Each structure stands twice: as C-alpha cells, then as structure tokens.
Image (cartoon, rainbow, N blue to C red):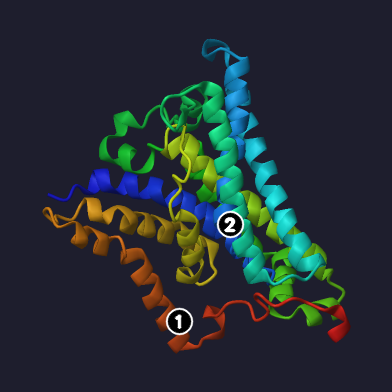
C-alpha cells in the first residue's frame, strides 16, 4: 500500500536541494546570465561545507561543540566557496564576454573535480577504509527538527520534521519572488535580463546587476549542496554522490516558468518523482524501474512543449538570456 505520510517527507528532503538550486538559477537567469554551472556550484558548496565541518570536528571534541559554530562554520565556508564560483562565472562571461553555455559546462566539470579532489583528500586524512567521510557531530545540528514535531502525529511528520535549512529554502524562495515582483531592485533586474541596452540607457548598471544576481544565485545554490551533505546524507560525503540533482534544478527553472514561489511546490513534486520508482511495484524487472526514473525529465519536456505552444510573454525566459552584452552595440 502506498504510504503517503512516509512518502511526502522523503519527497520534501529530495526536493530541498532542487529548491535551492532552482531559486539561485532563477535569480541568475533573470539578469540574462544562463549559468549551466549550477551542478558544479552545488558540488563546491557541499565540499566547502564539509571542509569547514571536518576541521571544526578535528579541533573540538563533540561534547564541547558550540551549536552556533557547528552550523555557522560550514555555512560560511559553503557560501564563500559558491560565491567564488559565481565570481569566476561573471569574470568569464560578463567581463571577458566568454560564451555562457561553454563557461557553465566548464564550471560544472571544474566544480565536480574540485569536490572530488578535496573529498578524496579528506578521506585519506581520516584513514577510512571506505570511500566516504562521516561528519555526524556537526550534521546532527543541521538535522534537528522542531522539538514538538513528534507529538503532532502525521501533521508533525509531514510539516515539522525537517532541519532548519529546509525551512530556510522556502523562506529564500518566497523572499526572492517578492523582490522580483514587488521591489525596484527586482524591476531593474528583470529589465537587465529583458533588454540590457534599454536598461543601460536608463542609467542602470548592467554589469553590477549581472554580478550581484549571479553571485547571490550561486550562494543560494551552494546551500543546496550543503543541505544534501549535512542533512539529507546525514553528514556523509562520498565522491560523485550528488547524482544529477544539479541538472534537475536547472530543469525545474523551466518547469516553474522562472517563478521562485512556484518552485516550492514544484521542487517537492520533482523530489517525489525522483523517488517514485521506490514506491511503484515493478517486481524484479529492473528496466521498468529505470523507466520510472525518467519521469521528472519527461514531465519537464512536456511542460517545455506546452509553454512553447502557449507563446505567452510572461511564460518565456528573459529575452537576453545567454546573450553577451556589448555596450558599444547600443
């Protein structure tokens, strides 16, 4: 029998990294930058958090750990690492005007390589016999749920049983949606993404908006990598364990039609699609399970086709998405 109460929390936990990644990418794309390096950014955000957590655990016994430092050090390391990835992308695409598609793909390869290198180095430092490293002391602070969740029955399990990073992802998505729709900054950011030449003529600093939006978006996406390691994976780092979550986050941008608030439910839906094959009886036929794993991508293709057929302007990507801006061409 399909157990909805156990399925929803797992879908939410699968969807939170996608929510972080898609929210960050939406902000980036609203500025006209197409950052296909989000998978690499999330990977770097995860490994940088692991590095900070590892050295803090090495320096302080578990019984003497400070909750603020146990959470703050990995988060700061994750934010700084993903910020550097965003700055590198902007340097190449905004300042040097390199091709955005090629740069994004290169950053993905670079980020995965960086993560695997430092992850492998930490595993060697611990002398572990298995190719992974466990940071259970610090991850326990990230995984703490609300104290009264267990006493609320199914409601507590479905809505209150997550770590603080899950709720932070929802808050960031809501705030991002509000900023884009209701503030002057959001209006100017959307103007830069639609027509940078017009925005420039109106006195808006196009390069500054592209830099800030891309760097902030990268930092948000990096938190998705941190959440995956410290909460979903219970502090266990293994090289190449992220799978295709970064690419699913980019696909979610299209699915949500560039709206961060819609990403909240859409990420949970995609998270459910991602693990649905575990809940659908398929017997011993492994090929059927592989077909079920295709569901998120098939849904994205269907949405893309429907959006393309509707041709409504509000459902389309920013007009200058992926195009370099040359001020001399105005």
Numbered badge on residue 108: 2
- Helix, strand or loop for disc 2: helix
Q: In percent of the image, x 18 and y 56: which residue is there?
A: 280
For marks 2 and 1, give the CA distance: 27 Å
Give the crowd class for mark 1: few <14, some 14-19, many >=20 residues within 10 Å. Answer: some
Q: Is residue 19 left or right of residue 276?
A: right
Give the residue drawn at x 26%, y 55%.
Answer: 276
Q: Are marks 2 and 1 in contact (CB under 8 Å)?
A: no
Instruction: Judge whether residue 175 can be spotted in this image.
Output: no
Task: Identify the residue at horizontal 49%, vertical 35% (top origin).
Answer: 230
Q: Is mark 1 on a helix, strand or loop?
A: helix
The foreground one among 58 and 185 is 58
Instruction: Point out which mark residue 307 bears.
Output: 1
**Vertical side of 15 occupied by 192: above or below:** below
Q: Is residue 30 left or right of residue 146?
A: right
Residue at the (30%, 60%) spot, across then down = 293
Q: Nearer the viewer, mark 2 or mark 1?
A: 2
Q: Residue 297 shows which numbered tag?
A: none
Location of residue 231 by image quarter:
top left
Picture layout, residue 112 above or below residue 26: above
Residue 85 appears at what percent x and percent y? 68, 52
CA neighbours of label 2 inside 10 A, class few (<14), some (14 to 19), many (20+)? many
């Amino acid at each position: 029998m399909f157990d909805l109460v156990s399925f929803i929390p797992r879908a939410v936990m699968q969807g939170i990294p996608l929510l972080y990644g898609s929210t960050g990418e939406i902000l980036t794309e609203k500025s006209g930058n197409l950052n296909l390096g989000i998978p690499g950014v999330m990977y770097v955000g995860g490994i940088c958090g692991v590095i900070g957590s590892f050295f803090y655990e090495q320096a302080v016994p578990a019984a003497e750990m400070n909750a603020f430092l146990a959470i703050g050090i990995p988060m700061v390391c994750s934010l700084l690492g993903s910020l550097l990835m965003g700055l590198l992308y902007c340097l190449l695409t905004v300042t040097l005007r390199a091709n955005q598609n090629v740069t994004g793909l290169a950053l993905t390869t670079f980020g995965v390589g960086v993560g695997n290198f430092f992850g492998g180095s930490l595993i060697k430092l611990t002398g572990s016999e298995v190719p992974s490293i466990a940071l259970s002391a610090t991850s326990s602070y990230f995984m703490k749920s609300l104290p009264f969740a267990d006493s609320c029955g199914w409601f507590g399990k479905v809505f209150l049983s997550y770590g603080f990073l899950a709720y932070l992802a929802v808050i960031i998505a809501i705030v991002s949606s509000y900023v884009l729709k209701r503030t002057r900054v959001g209006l100017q950011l959307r103007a830069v993404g639609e027509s940078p030449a017009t925005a420039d003529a109106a006195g808006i600093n196009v390069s500054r908006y592209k830099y800030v939006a891309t760097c902030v978006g990268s930092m948000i996406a990096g938190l998705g990598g941190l959440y995956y390691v410290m909460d979903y994976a219970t502090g266990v780092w293994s090289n190449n364990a992220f799978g295709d979550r970064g690419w699913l986050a980019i696909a979610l941008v299209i699915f949500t039609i560039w709206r961060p608030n819609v990403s909240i439910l859409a990420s949970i839906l995609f998270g459910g699609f991602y693990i649905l094959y575990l809940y659908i009886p398929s017997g011993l036929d492994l090929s059927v399970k592989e077909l079920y794993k295709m569901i998120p991508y098939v849904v994205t293709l269907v949405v893309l086709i429907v959006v393309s057929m509707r041709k409504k302007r509000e459902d389309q990507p920013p007009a200058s998405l992926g195009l370099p801006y040359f001020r001399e061409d105005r």
